[in-house]
Each structure stands twice: as C-alpha cells, then as structure tokens.
Image (cartoon, rainbow, N blue to C red):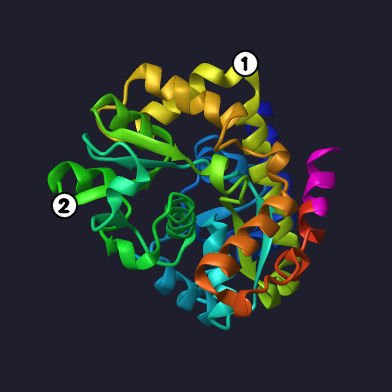
Amino acid sequence: MTMYARSIASTVPAAAAMLALLMPTLGAAEGLQTLRTEGGTITFRVAQQQGFFEKHGIKIQKEDSGTGAAMNVRLGKGEIDVVDGGLDNGIAATLQGVDAVIVTGSSLAGQELVAQPGIRSIKDLRGKTIAVDSTDMQAALVLKKMLLAGGLKPKDYTLKVVGANRLKAMREDKQYAAAMLAGAQSLLAKQEGFISLGNSLDVVGPVTYHGVFVRRSWARDNADVLTRYIAAEIEAQRWILLPANKQKVVAFILKTSPEGTTDAMAEDVYREMVNGPGELTKDIRLEVPALQNFLKLRAEVQGSWQGSPPPAEKFYDSSYYYKALDLVSH
C-alpha cells in the first residue's frame, strides 16, 4: 500500500467516527430548529437575510394566515410557533382566549393620518369613508383617537376595511378620504400630493408596534429555542442600528418598499427607524410604558376590559429576553 493510500485509509475511520459523534447532536438540533413563524418586521427579515437565525441553529418555516384574526386562531391551535409582527395582535389574542405572551418589543409606532388632496383638517373628514386594514387593531385604534381629538365621533365617519395597502386604495378610489400610513407609504403619499393631518405621537404618544409573541405553554416547553430565536433578533437589531451598516440597511429598505420609493425616501425611513416616530428599540427590548399606553388606548376607544386597562405586566414575560441578551453578550 502506498503512503497516499495508507493516509486515506487512516483518515476514513477517523472521519466516520467524527460523523458518528456529530449525528445525534445534529438530529437533536434539527428537532428543535424549525420554527413556524408568521411576521414580516425589518428585524425578522434582516435576521433571515444576514443568517442570524441559522447562526443560532434555527430554520424558519414562514407562515401566512391572511388576517390577524386567522393568525391568532392558528396560534391558539398550535399551528404557529412564533408571531413576529404587530403586538396589538398579541393583545387581541388574549381577548380571544389565547394564552399569548409578549416576549420582545422591536419598535414603537409612528403613523400619520394622511388624506386626499383638498382635505385640510380632521373636521373635513365628517361624513367621509376612511380606509383601514382592520376596525379594531392598532392603526384603527390610533385613528379613532386622533379623530376624536379632532372633534369627530364614531357616528361622524365610516371605516371600510381595504387590507394592508391603504395607499393603493386611496389612489384608486377617491371615496377613501384618508388612512393611517407609516414609513415609505406615508412619504410616498405626501410626495404624490396627499395631505398629512397629523402624527400619532402628537395625540396618542409612544405605543408599542412590532415585537414577538407566543403561547405561554409553548414558551415553557421550548425555552431554549425561543431564547436562541430572540438572540438572533437582538443581533439583527444591532446590525440594523450599527452606523457602519447604514447604506446596506437603506438599500434593504428601498428593495422592500412600495414601487415608487426613492433613495431619499429610504434614507428618511432609515432616519425614523434610528431616531424618530417609528424608531427601533435598543436590543429589541420591550418598552413597558409604551405597552401600557397602548392598553390605555384600547380601553378608551374600544372599551376593552370594561374601559379599565389591566397592568402591562399581565401581558409580557421578559425572562426569555434576558436569557437571550446574556447569550449574545458572551
């Protein structure tokens, strides 16, 4: 046998032994790593694009239930593991009997009430139809509060559900006098001549927007993988907010924004995310006062909890977050 052949022969058993040692670990990891996740926040998408989930041993199986109500039903049935999106859906899930719990809060809400050209004030919306994606979720609740502050009661206007692309609805049908818009959509609308009637922060103050919520029982049974999921998103949030990555983030915003969004608009969206009405939170930490403010808003305009909001502590559990934070700090 040649020296080369002897080298190969000695290597093969060693490699086989190494593979045998690794196989149980890989099999166990695979059993934990696939997460059925619904959502589309920038933190989630960057974590996917930059490989942070894979780094923490997680494979994402993307889910799409169509509506928030359908998503909450599926979450309650255990058909979805993680929801990564509007935290108002998490609150609504608890009202629907789902034992949901918020575990992170990746951004705050900063939305504008945008109207058709010629409408100059909220009072001009009297008797008009306003486009919404839901009549009882966050954007609609903020809208109702802003209209009330502007002198309009629910009987003074009509809400019509048109889906998530409210700007498209306003472009195609002038009967939709106004809508709540955010980010690139609000910037694009104003460039096209639509009129801003005010920002939610000026009327409602900071409220929670995006984050992660799960079922409590699932969290208890899957604490390790949930911790790793949160760790991946902490790293993604840090990547987004790192000044050195600004141009990459702006390019990502431009790529994922509505058609017609310009480079300058993408820059404006970035500035708002870093330090503005819809800013991202440091290390996806839940801002508890902003959550309490949202509960107060829901109680006031929707009458939830007989008009008396419960303490925010009832709806979140930070224990998984702090374990994840410790994980990425080492």
Q: Is residue 234 left or right of residue 276?
A: right
Q: Which residue is nearer to you in this view: 309 or 134?
A: 309
Q: Position of residue 247 (x, y in %)?
A: 50, 17
Residue drawn at (66%, 44%) of the image: 232
Q: Range of the magenta residues?
A: 322-330
Amino acid of disc 2: Gln
Q: Which residue is nearer to you in this view: 285 or 255?
A: 285
Element type at mark 1: helix
Residue drawn at (49%, 58%) of the image: 138
Q: Which residue is nearer to you in this view: 235 or 57?
A: 235
What distance separates the C-alpha of mark 2 from that of mark 1? 45 Å
Q: Residues within 10 Å of mark 1 (few under 14, many from 20)?
A: few
Q: Is residue 132 magenta?
A: no
Q: Which residue is mark 2?
A: 175
Q: Which residue is mark 1?
A: 244
Q: Is residue 211 visible?
A: yes
Q: Is residue 324 magenta?
A: yes
For the N terminus, give its image quadrant.
top right
For the C terminus, give its image quadrant.
top right
Determine the image quadrant of residue 299.
Answer: bottom right
Residue drawn at (78%, 50%) of the image: 324
